[in-house]
Image (tube, rainbow, N blue to C red):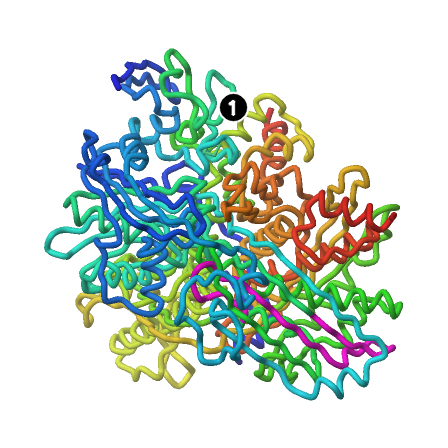
Amino acid sequence: MAFDKLNSSDFKYIGTRPDRPDGVDKVTGRANYGADAYAAGMLHGAMVRSPHAHARIIRIDGSRALALAGVKAVVTRADFAEDVEGEYWNVLDNVMAGERALYHGHAVAAVAATSSLIAREAVALVDVEYEVLPHVTDVDEAMQPDAPVIREGQVSTSVPAGLSPNVVGYYEHGHGDLDAGFAEADLIIERHFTVEAAHQGYIEPHACLAQLGPDGRGELWCCTQGQWFDQKFCAALLGIETSALKVTASEIGGGFGGKTTQFIEPVALALSRKTNRPVKVVMNRSEVFKASGPTSSSSMDVKIGMTNDGRISAAQGTYRLQGGAFPGAWAMLTAQCAFAPYQINHVKTTGYDVMCNRPKVAAYRAPGSPIAAFSTESVIDELCNRLRLDPMEVRLKNAAREGTRSSYGPIYPKIGLVDCLEAAKAHPHWTSPLKEGHGRGISCGFWFNFGMETSVNLMLSEDGSIQITVGTPDIGGSRASIALMAAEELGIPYENIRVNIADTASLGFNEMSHGSRVTFACGLATVEAARDATDKLCARAAAKWGISEEAVKWRDGCAIPAGSNAGEFDPLPIEEIAGRMGRTGGPISGHHSVTPDGAGPSFAVHIVDSEVDPETGKTEITRYTVVQDAGRAIHPSYVEGQYQGGAAQGIGWALNEEYIYDEQGRLQNDGFLDYRIPVASDLPMIDTVIVETPNPGHPYGVRGVGETSICPPLAAIANSVSNAAGVRLTHLPMSPPRILKAMKERLG
Amino acid sequence: MSRIHVTARVNGDKVEFLCDPRETLLDVLRDNLGLTGTKEGCGTGDCGACSVTVDGRLICSCLMLGAEAEGKEIGTVEGIANGEELHPLQVKFIEHAALQCGICTPGILVAAKNLLEHNPAPSETEVRYWLAGNLCRCTGYDKIIRAVLDTAAEIRAAN
Ligand code: FES
Ligand code: FES
């Protein structure tokens, strides 16, 4: 029987909630994060950053800094490799400006000194002469033909002619005949939306400790979502062989996509090479906001036609995303996600990647999808209101299901959107009466989920316990889910399994901890590595019993005869085989390397109640429910945690979080005081419902859960606020001044 | 700049250190005393990752100078467990999955322990406001609040 046919009750370990293996380390302060590494003789690095949004660098003079006692080196772009291209060049030019500083906070030089205090003093002594250039930070303005040009020659071939050279990517998706589809509609609504940029907001700033010797060999310790990518990019930017650099991932204090690229790591290596000493670099919070990856800000137009009975007859969307001063905004993903939850016969989306004078965007949890859902689901909600239709029933009526051609192309395999909508409809939250002045809103959300390159090793110890080596940093409890899947497969206690995170020298290549892929891909490889090991364990039992290998199978931690014909033998437990493995053929281990392509799309439905204070415009979230398809919840507590965390980040983005630039293109709110993420007193408990519609592409049905949870909140909250306050905001975040303004305008 | 000699107690142990007058208590704990359990999330008093107690009072160690620690009793996350016995909050945080990445956890544990010492029976709202200075980006706070409330109930039941 395929595992996706199994019920949760068929499992012994999967679906249980044991303590995470790294729990004690993390509640005692023992776990070592990026900034927790020290080395003998270590220097401290600090960055010199541009005070301008756009400026030509005329001259950099480090002599005053170098004259300060304790300062050991100043590096600039000249200390990095010259012959890098493509995305390597983009990352290089982002971590250390070349001819021009392209945004406020762009690194232009760096210093290393014997203490961090001296390093900070030295930064102020590096003399940089700039010629200030015209800048642009707004996505719509950056698309205008007369906008300041960030860089010529970046435009991809698909971009239609006649646009500013800042428009570097163009994407189209969809099917059907829009004119025919809109002709079928009884009501068509078209709206313009804007969403400001948000930051991932991980609490741990970027931090690393680097060592690179004159022999071109080095080591790097850093907080990262993907150590192999740091290895590859840092090596290229420093002009050394990839294998000459060993990268160790520290414990990671949050990433959400923001630790999938390099910022300070190549610079720390350059400083180390120049001084031949270990160099530690830790960003401060202001630098994190100014120079590490925020999301795109966006400008969107969405038009949807609906029939009187609630069928979406046609849908069209245009999405413009700025990616900072480099190509790589995720307009393609926005265009793909926008109508993914629905079965629509006539649908077309177009996306534009735009450059402007802002930091290079990095992925943020389901990049592009939350803003897509905001625009789509706001218009659907307005259509439901105008046509007096139940918003849940309309979504059920149009919901994509197995066999639906998605708006971005593929035909869906088994998916769980209808199951989520049914569960949301049945949830007491949906039917509970609303208090006077409160509003309720819902939204669907979608994310692809990813597989990608994965390697896992599994080693048997002589006492029968297991060590598993994976290459994906544990960002939110994945050691526990990996150990649970191995326990299930091997039939041994969860506690007998230790999961280690490998450095780049200790395991084959692994893609990063992103794309909601770890429990899916790393879990799949773990199950296969365990099967590889149990095949070998069975072979040892077969040899001992003198029967064929096919006549032995693995059950509950023991080799047993496969059937009555195999003969009568007592079960041979793993510890007995392990104790003798040296004498029966050598050490036993399992391995699996794979690039799995069966990641299952996942969907969520959120229900939100809110109340808006008419005096201040402040929105209070009074009740929140997340319903999401996990495929299979391996450790339900951490699945719930992902649902709650995504919802909370969405609440922050919907209500408060935004990058604010002044007229000179300088970031005005580079700290947690002015860039306000939700605190405990801002939020209610967040109720969760785990729907399990198993993914046929994973042995236990796992889909991946990390990202989908941030897709519905922006829209669900906008819909809730429009019902609570009678104003529909099309510009996020719905900060108190914006809501107040809208409420005043409504009252005339 | 000449360094200042400071004598204090950290988690009950006497410590002596020399510090630059510009160094914060957080810098001293981490860089001079090797107590890296206390984290720096912002350095400006906005995130609570650096929470410690000074003479029983909850503070952000990034906002106090190391030199000001003279004669003070400082409590950090490393002092929460009693030898090999975890504090009930630590046990409950693991049991409730009240941490994902765990970077906020040391500060939140220090703050929550301080709360329960002041108020053994806090309401949900009181816990939320007490912890409002401790940012967590991963959990949405739900499981953190539950873990604190559950610990309080357990400690009350045991007494
Ligand atoms: S580091 Fe002290 S409050 Fe953030
Ligand atoms: S668990 Fe990651 S910040 Fe709280």
Judge left or right: residue A82 versus residue B47. left
Q: How many labels does the image show?
A: 1
Residue A516 appears in the rendering: yes
Query: Where residue A310 sits in the image (x, y, percent)?
Result: 82, 75
Q: Which residue is drawn at 63% across and 23% down?
A: B119
> Dot 1 falls on which chain?
B
Name the one closer to the observer, A203 or B77. A203
| Residue farthest top in this picture | B71
Residue picked out by circle 1 = B58
Residue A248 lies in the magenta stretch: no
Q: In which quarter of the image is residue A528?
A: bottom left
Judge left or right: residue A83 versus residue A554. left
Label 1: how many residues lie within 10 Å, few (<14), some (14-19) or many (20+)?
many
Query: Where residue B122 sits in the image (x, y, percent)?
Result: 66, 29
Judge left or right: residue B5 versus residue A616. left
Question: Image height check: is A398 above or below B18?
Answer: below
Name the one closer to the observer, A486 or A263. A263
What's drawn in magenta, residue-wise? A302-331
Name the one closer to the observer, B45 or B127. B45
Question: Image height check: is A377 above or below A568?
Answer: above
